Image (spheres, coloured by chain):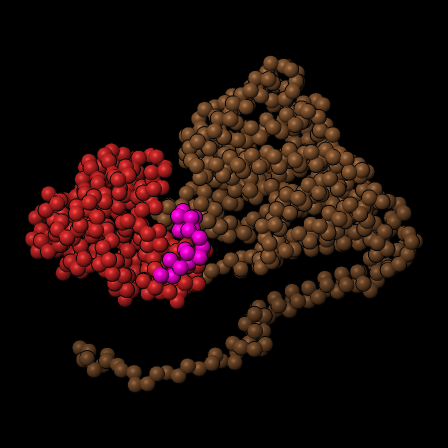
Amino acid sequence: MAQAAVQSPAENEIAIQISAMNKWYGEFHVLRDINLTVYKGERIVICGPSGSGKSTLIRCINRLEEHQKGDIVVDGIPLTNDLKKIDEVRREVGMVFQHFNLFPHLTVLENCTLAPIWVRKLPKKDADELAMKLLTRVKIPEQALKYPGQLSGGQQQRVAIARALCMNPKLMLFDEPTSALDPEMIKEVLEVMVDLAQSGMTMLCVTHEMGFARQVANRVIFMDQGQIVEQNAPAEFFSNPKSERTRLFLSQILH
Amino acid sequence: MALTPSSVAYLRQEDAPRLPPPASMTGLQGWLRQNLFPSIGSSLVTILFGALALWVLSSIFDFAFLRAVWSGADRQACLGENSGACWPMVAAKMGQWVYGFYPIDQRWRVNVCFVAGAALLAPMLIPSAPYKNWNVALLFLAFPLVTLVLLTGGNFNFDLATYALVISLMLLAAVIVPLAAFGLEEGIACNKAGLGLAGAAVGLWFASFLTGPLQTTIGGTSNSLISILTGLLLLGSGALSIGTAVRRAPRGGFVAAAGWAVGLAGILLAMLLLDFDFGLLPVETPQWGGLTVTLVVSITGIVVSLPVGIVLALGRRSRMPIVRMLSVIYIEIIRGVPLITVLFMSSVMLPLFLPPGTSFDKLLRALIGVAMFSSAYMAEVVRGGLQSIPKGQYEGAMAVGLSFWQMMNKIVLPQALKVSIPNIVGNFISLFKDTTLLLIIGLFDLLGILQASLRDSAWATASSAPTGYLTVALMYWVFCFGMSRYSIYTERRLHTGHKR
């Protein structure tokens, strides 16, 4: 069923395979029977009402959250309790958070070079070069020597994207990247994300920016109460939602 | 009465000019008005306290300078009807206050330690000074050894049992290697056998106290079955721990194991150095005293308590129930007991854990007591700092692929310690002053030696005590104020204008 929605991504190589995955917070069953296959180069937007488990789902993909049942295989690496496998996955998966989570005691440049130097063992000079290249790509090379606290929200989120890209990830997770931003800053972050999507990066993005979903997504996934309720190509998803819950949700956020 | 659009509409025609602030906000006059005389009540308080401050300061000035006696050979000089501070007494006694009862012809050894310490500490405190790595190595490894040899005279004459004890303790410490290499949780999970053997060895060692006379050292050389068994268990535990670390992860494990080997070699080398006869006159610790003892005890306490406190704080926040429980028990027991009790315990109870032959120095026991005590407090200070770090920082660090210790070293601890600087330095300062309690177990710190010297009839005058206390208070104040200012400087330096 998922394949039907996928046309553009290359050769149907699988990036993420989630099968029969379940997760509980204590007694509470947050994720129920999640099955999802993400192909390389796919751009997926996940939406749904608050508390529907969309953030939890993408946080399971780099093991910021642990799942209790089912399998998650990321880039051929199964996620289990094995710390080495978790480290391998985290090296290949970049993540951007709602509240940026930049390191306030390090400069923008140091934020970007920290992981390449300590995890990828890149020489400092090469790491600096790489970081400057990516800061240029997100259009803030001139802020490299400032501290995150001296930047605007939009600039901080672009640094966070550059920081994730510095690890040269195979796929990127976005957890509501624009929800904490002032309206006039959302655009500059979305522009960077569109640019990234056009470069062929595999992306999973939890967002309420439906314009972004229409523009770049191959697939939109609607989640409610811990389940994947509906997924489809964006045009079809927005114009002809199949489930009652999706219709209700869309009517509330698109006015 | 409907509002017409024209009644609320407004359009600014030109920008309002930007003006300088009014005169009452700027200059000396503005400052005085804002800070000292903003209202009648405040003005009265200012005048009242100003007068009080003037009176106190002028009294001290009068006592310390105007009425002071500046020269003389003994108490006769200071017996005058209206004489103030007795400075010749300070000049005569200063040597004792600084060096205690250290032999006068050997005082140069203490001086060498003071000068070397200051020379190594100064570049350490200046952030831009070069060769920080060498500086750290010299200050924290070479300097304590040299100080130990110089102050005591070296030539410790360790016996074989002591070497065996140290090697056993290092084998016991090898269980930390996997923890350091793979993080707390994973390190425990992959080295259960090693930890089990270590636990059995420690249990056996404790059990040996119950069964018989204190003949057993941990893995010592006495021929009793228990001590041989303990030694074998420790050997197994150490070998397993190191083996696990080397086998499981080529990167972290090997480095940690190498670190352990270097540590063992370093400690044995240091012991050989301490064993060597440099021909210095031995000076027993009861002869030490005054500022020397204050500095030795407080600096040791400071240097030990910070790392131990960090480890305890991390332990208390660990998800491993046993690690957390042990940390909580240690912290809460020590914090629930006054320092004096800890000092008594360490001077009375610690020797029970050691074989009879080993004489255990009173000052050393006090040092251990002070370090244990301040570590528990430091742990809570650091834990407060750790708690101020939002979850997002951990997640950000994990998401870019940092390992547990990289995350701690690069992200969490720098921020947590920065937040805790005022409290950490507060602990340092109170520790520095708490050394005075050593008087209770018969060691003379700066204040203790002052009180001892006030009993000297050669300088018994009415103004001797005030002069002495004033001088010693000033000496304490210089050190504490220095620490306080340096902490403020560090806070400013590390401030990166972040709100997070």
Which chain is represented by red in the image? A
The quadrant in which residue B305 appears is top right
Up-down relation of residue B443 to residue B19 (above or below): above
Which region of the structure is painted magenta?
Answer: A116-133
Q: Where residue A161 appears, x then y in whole percent? A: 32, 56
Residue A122 colored in magenta in the image: yes
Q: Which residue is pictured at 59% across the width and 70% down the height? A: B36
The x and y percentages for residue B4 are 18, 80
Residue farthest to the bottom, as pictured: B13
Quadrant showing the N terminus of chain A: top left
Picture quarter containing residue B165? top right
The brown chain is B
Residue ID at (77%, 63%)? B61
Q: Nearer the viewer, residue B292 or B168?
A: B168
Question: Residue B239: where, in percent of width, then height?
Answer: 51, 26
Q: How many marks?
A: 0
Q: Is residue A101 in the magenta section?
A: no
Q: Main secondary structure of the magenta part?
A: helix
Rendered location of residue B168, percent (x, y): 59, 26
The quadrant of the picture occupied by the C terminus of chain A is bottom left
The answer to whether any part of residue B446 appears in the image is no
Determine the residue positioned at 54% across, 38% down: B259
Residue under the image location 61 percent in, 50 percent down: B134
Left or right: residue B102 versus residue B197 is: right
Q: Quadrant of residue B230?
A: top right
Q: Nearer the viewer, residue A130 or B436?
A: A130
